[in-house]
Amino acid sequence: MRVFNFAAGPSTLPENVLKQAQAELLDFAGTGMSVTEISHRDKAFDAVVKEAEALVRKLLKVPDDYAVLFVQGGASQQFAAIPLNLMHNGKADYIVTGNFAKKAWQEGQIYGEAVKLADTSDKTYTYIPDVKALNYSDDADYCHITSNNTIFGTRYIEFPDCKAPLVADMSSEIFSREIDVSKFGVIYAGAQKNLAPAGVTIVIAKRDLIQNPLKICPTLLKWKVQDENGSLYNTPPCFAIYMAKLVLENLDKNGGVKAINEINEYKAGLLYDYIDNSTFYTNSVVKQFRSIMNVPFVTPNAELDAKFVAEAKKAGLVSLKGHRLVGGMRASIYNAMPVEGVKALIEFMKKFEMENK
Ligand SMILES: *Cc1c(COP(=O)(O)O)cnc(C)c1O
């Protein structure tokens, strides 16, 4: 039986997409081979990469002067690629709103002066700072943010309007809400949260920013090289790119980002409303910054939290355990989580509350 999977990443994928991949597995596009067996130089695979790129461009309305790249190494590898491609003056601003934001900032320090503009760990990362009140560096090469904080369940509502190019880690929310790409210098996202299996990372970068990577930048991390080679400089993560293409086709068919955003807001609204009206469950994120993708919550004590996770699993609601840094529970309700999954979770929460209050 297929369960409702609330994992933060790798995470649930649309069932119809999985079925399509299954149906095409032994004979992809009339090649008599699976997509994992054909050459990445085969024209059948070249078409996959080109279609995936075209779908990213269409769904996010990416301007023509931006590169769309499919690279490896996860979002974490991009923590290094960012300074290696952009840090010409040796200085960048970082807004630290969670664990991944902190890791990006720490990686930035290897290559130059990584200025921490704000750090919300004072309140266990339960809010986003006022981006209008921050003291941006005049000579920064870029300003880095994490737009949705996967572990702590926060997201930016308003983005910094800084002079330096804005670089955003959107791993856990890309394609979940509409964004104005032209406001960003670089957007990047590991696929395994809201897009595809692990193995591919999307980078969307304004081309005029990426023409002069630092001398020490490894060839594979040079966005310019990836762009000039259509993400095929070396063997790409073929299967993950293929799956991303199927997921994006499916999203496009179902009304695109605007339509899925309405569903995402509805799903998150159901869950937060239930939590807020309950005297048993708590979510401690400042309301205006609540993520619509990752919803952390707790019961009155850690013992009940553990019981909740175990019993939910038996009821077919899996991977609800919170991140080890915060404990409790976390429901990741990405694009592929159906409304019925969230409703089933709420029904389970009601029952658990009644039995354990
Ligand atoms: C998961 C995640 C990462 C790390 O991704 P990897 O692909 O494991 O390197 C980075 N940033 C955010 C916001 C994430 O959710």
Image: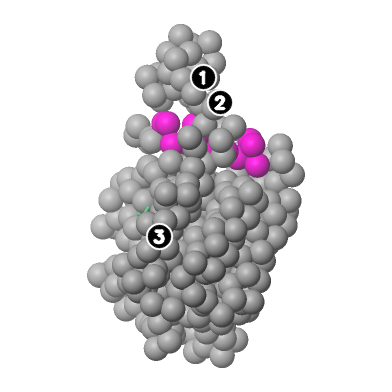
Residue at 45% x, 55% y is: 312
The amino acid type of the residue labelled 2 equals Gln
Label 2 and label 1: CA atoms lie apart by 6 Å
- What residue is shown with label 3? 309
Query: Mark 2 sits on what residue?
Result: 20
Picture coordinates of residue 77, whole percent (x, y)? 33, 55
Dot 1: within a 10 Å radius of its alpha carbon, few (fewer than 14), some, or many (20 or more) residues? Answer: some
> Mark 2 or mark 3: which is in front?
3
Tell me which secondary structure the magenta stretch mostly adopts: helix
Residues at marks 1 and 3, CA–CA distance in whole angstroms: 36 Å
Image spot of residue 114 (x, y percent): 34, 77
Q: Disc 2 on helix, strand or loop? A: helix
Q: Contact (CB < 8 A) between labels 2 and 1?
A: yes
Model colouring = one colour
Asked if the magenta segment contains residue 240, the reply would be: yes
Identify residue for label 1: 24
> In whole angstroms, how far apart are the C-alphas of marks 2 and 3?
31 Å
Q: Earlier in the sequence, mark 1 or mark 3?
A: 1
Q: Residue at coordinates 52% horizontally, 76% vertically from top-left?
A: 280
Per the image, is 289 magenta?
Answer: no
- Range shown magenta: 238-251
Left or right of 222? Residue 283 is right
Q: Is residue 273 above or below residue 26?
A: below
Q: Residue furthest front?
A: 355
Three-letter residue code for mark 3: Val
The kind of residue tagged 1 is: Glu
Q: Ligand 1: does it lie within 8 Å of the C-beta at label 3?
A: no
| Count of marks overlaid on the render | 3
